[in-house]
Image: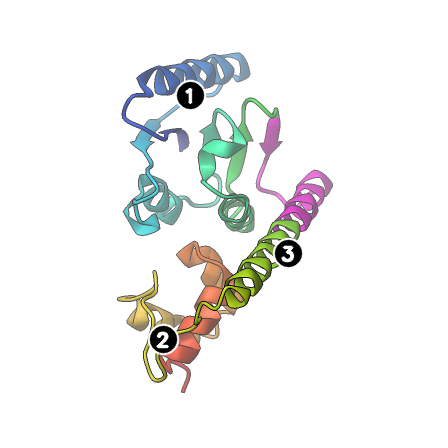
C-alpha cells in the first residue's frame, strides 16, 4: 500500500494541504507510483500524540508499505519525534519518501539508510543536549530569583503515558527495550523510564 500523508498546523492553511497533495501526486506520477490512500490532518499543540491520524497510520504500516510526505517537517512537530518515527518505519522495512528533500529510504538496511539513521541520531542527540542546557539554565535563573522548584513530597506528576500502564507492563513482560517502547509510544525514552519508575510498573 502507498499512503500519502498531508499535515497543516492551523485550520486556515487549506492552501498548504492542497499544495502538498499536488506536489505528492506529481511526484508519484513521475515515479510510476499509485497512491492507495491519502491521509490529511490538522495538528495543533494541544492535540495529543495518540489522537493524531499519523499515529493510527504508523500502527498499521507493515513491511513493503510506502509513506509519502511533501517534506520532512510534516512528519512531526519536533526533530526527536520525526527521527523516532523514521527509525520505527525503517525497522519495519517501510519505504519513506520525502519529496522536497528528495529522500527515498526503501526500508532495507542498505548503506544509505544506515547513513541517514546515523545523521538523524546525531541530530536527535544534539537537540536533546541543547534542550538539557536550556532547561538547566532556566532552572538556575529561577533558583537565583528565589523560586521554589519541585513538587510536594510524595506527589505524582501527570504524564502523557497515564492510562497506558497495562500496555507498558505488557511491553515489559515481553522484554521490549525502553528505546523500542519510546518509539512505539512516540515519546522520549526518559519519559518511559521515569513513568515506569514512578508508577512502579517493573516487577
Q: Position of residue 120 (x, y in %)?
A: 64, 45
Give how far apart the Cα atoms at labels 3 and 2 are.
29 Å
Q: Which scheme is used to colour this image of the protein?
A: rainbow
Q: Which residue position is annotated with label 1?
A: 34
**Residue 65 seen by the camera:** no
Q: Position of residue 144 (x, y in %)?
A: 55, 66
Q: Which residue position is annotated with label 2?
A: 169
- In the image, is residue 103 above or below residue 112? above
Q: Residue at x 48, y 56 (%)?
A: 183
Q: Assess whether residue 199 is covered by the magenta stretch.
A: no
Mark 3–mark 2 contact, CB under 8 Å?
A: no
Q: Position of residue 43 (x, y in %)?
A: 33, 36
Considering the whole magenta stretch, tell me its main secondary structure.
helix
Query: For the N terminus, which image quadrant?
Result: top left
Query: In the orientation shown, which residue stands out farthest toward the bottom?
Result: 203
Which of disc 2 and disc 3 is earlier in sequence? 3
Give how far apart the Cα atoms at labels 2 and 1 are.
40 Å
Camera-nearest residue between 147 and 203: 147
Give how far apart the Cα atoms at labels 3 and 1 are.
41 Å
Dot 2 crowding, Cα within 10 Å, few <14, some 14–19, many 20+: some
Q: Which residue position is annotated with label 3?
A: 129
Q: Which residues are magenta?
A: 103-124
Q: Secondary structure at mark 3?
A: helix
- In the image, is residue 147 above or below residue 126? below
Mark 3–mark 1 contact, CB under 8 Å?
A: no
Q: Residue at x 59, y 36 (%)?
A: 106
Amino acid at each position: 500500500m502507498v499512503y500519502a500523508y498531508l499535515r497543516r498546523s492551523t485550520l486556515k492553511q487549506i492552501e498548504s494541504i492542497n499544495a502538498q497533495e499536488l506536489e505528492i501526486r506529481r511526484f508519484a506520477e513521475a515515479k510510476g507510483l499509485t497512491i492507495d490512500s491519502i491521509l490529511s490532518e490538522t495538528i495543533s499543540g494541544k492535540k495529543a500524540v495518540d489522537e493524531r491520524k499519523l499515529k493510527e497510520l504508523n500502527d498499521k504500516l507493515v513491511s513493503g508499505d510506502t509513506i509519502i510526505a511533501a517534506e520532512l517537517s510534516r512528519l512531526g512537530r519536533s526533530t526527536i519525534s520525526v527521527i523516532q518515527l523514521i527509525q520505527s518505519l525503517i525497522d519495519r522495512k517501510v519505504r519513506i519518501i520525502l519529496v522536497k528533500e528528495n529522500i527515498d529510504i526503501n526500508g532495507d538496511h542498505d548503506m544509505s539508510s544506515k547513513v541517514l539513521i546515523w545523521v538523524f541520531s546525531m541530530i536527535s542527540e544534539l537537540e536533546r543536549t541543547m534542550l538539557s542546557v536550556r532547561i538547566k539554565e532556566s532552572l538556575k535563573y529561577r533558583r537565583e530569583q528565589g523560586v521554589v522548584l519541585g513538587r510536594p513530597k510524595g506527589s505524582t506528576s501527570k504524564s502523557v503515558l497515564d492510562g497506558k500502564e497495562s500496555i507498558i507492563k505488557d511491553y515489559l513482560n515481553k522484554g521490549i527495550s525502553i528505546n523500542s517502547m519510546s518509539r512505539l509510544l512516540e515519546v522520549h525514552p526518559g519519559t518511559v523510564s521515569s513513568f515506569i519508575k514512578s508508577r512502579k510498573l517493573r516487577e
